[in-house]
């Protein structure tokens, strides 16, 4: 992993700044009338998910982050860790609840995910955009409440609670958007 200068910046490039891995989500080369050119970027922390704005002088170098993605399958929850298996080597890797973050609300056994490793340590997981989960608990919709767009809470098999339309009932399989944590559609009942 070498250094990259601002001319090589692109969306998706992973940099190591202040000892932390980041990914560039936006960049813009700026050439003001006076003074030196610079690059305005928006970078997202790969460990916390927070985005920050950062400006680099034109030609400034930054180290590329030693980050790799591996396809893994979620096996089970073991106390404070979630255990994933490498889809190629079958090697098992425990990842702390803290690193998995809110993604664990939509993880069921055998879900395929991308696990992000930084310097050989797992730091984050990326869920598929949509997952299908069963409703395990949901009160019946109130009779007479037919206002369009009305919702009620439902608990999914993973323990996540989301808002769903009133016609959803226990046992329904829902397609959930993992990026927003929102109901997308009912698959079957």
Image (cartoon, helix red, strand yellow):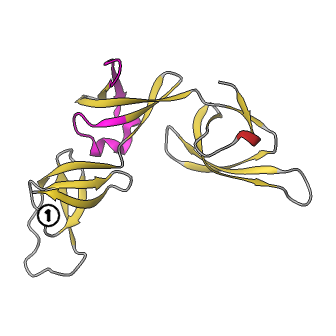
Q: Quadrant of residue 90?
A: top left
In the picture provided, is 47 more to the left or to the right than 177?
A: right
Q: Find residue 104 and report its horizontal and vertical position in percent.
A: 31, 41
In the picture provided, is 18 more to the left or to the right than 121?
A: right
Q: Find residue 39 and report its horizontal and vertical position in percent.
A: 75, 49
Q: Residue furthest right?
A: 34
Q: Find residue 144 and report its horizontal and vertical position in percent.
A: 9, 82
Q: Which residue is pictured at 17% across the width and 46% down the height?
A: 157
Front residue of 77 and 177: 177
Residue 87 within the magenta-colored segment of the rendering? yes
Instruction: Give, as a single range, the part of the protein colored magenta.
Output: 86-113
Q: Is residue 123 above or below residue 175?
A: above
Quick one: label 1, few (<14), some, or many (20+) residues within 10 Å?
A: many
Q: Which residue is pictured at 28% across the width and 32% down the height?
A: 74
Residue 159 within the magenta-colored segment of the rendering? no
Q: Is residue 158 above or below residue 73?
A: below
Q: Which residue is pictured at 25% across the width and 58% down the height?
A: 162
Q: Which residue is pictured at 49% across the width and 42% down the height?
A: 48
Q: Find residue 58 and report its horizontal and vertical position in percent.
A: 81, 45
Q: Which residue is mark 1?
A: 168
Q: From the image, which quarter does the C terminus lie in? A: bottom left
């Amino acid at each position: 992993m070498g250094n990259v200068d601002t001319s090589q910046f692109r969306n998706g490039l992973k940099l190591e700044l202040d000892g932390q891995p980041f990914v560039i989500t936006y960049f813009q080369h700026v050439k003001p009338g006076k003074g030196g050119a610079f690059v305005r970027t928006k970078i997202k922390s790969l460990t916390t998910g927070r985005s920050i704005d950062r400006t680099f002088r034109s030609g400034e170098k930054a180290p590329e982050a030693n980050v790799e993605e591996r396809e893994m399958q979620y096996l089970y929850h073991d106390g404070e860790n979630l255990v994933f298996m490498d889809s190629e080597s079958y090697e098992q890797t425990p990842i702390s609840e803290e690193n998995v973050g809110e993604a664990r609300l939509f993880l069921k056994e055998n879900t395929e995910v991308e696990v992000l490793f930084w310097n050989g340590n797992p730091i984050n997981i990326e869920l598929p955009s949509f997952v299908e989960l069963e409703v395990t608990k949901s009160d019946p919709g109130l009779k007479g409440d037919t206002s369009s767009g009305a919702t009620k809470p439902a608990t999914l098999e993973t323990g996540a609670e989301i808002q769903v339309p009133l016609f959803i009932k226990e046992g329904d399989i829902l397609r959930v958007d993992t990026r927003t944590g929102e109901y997308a559609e009912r698959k079957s009942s």
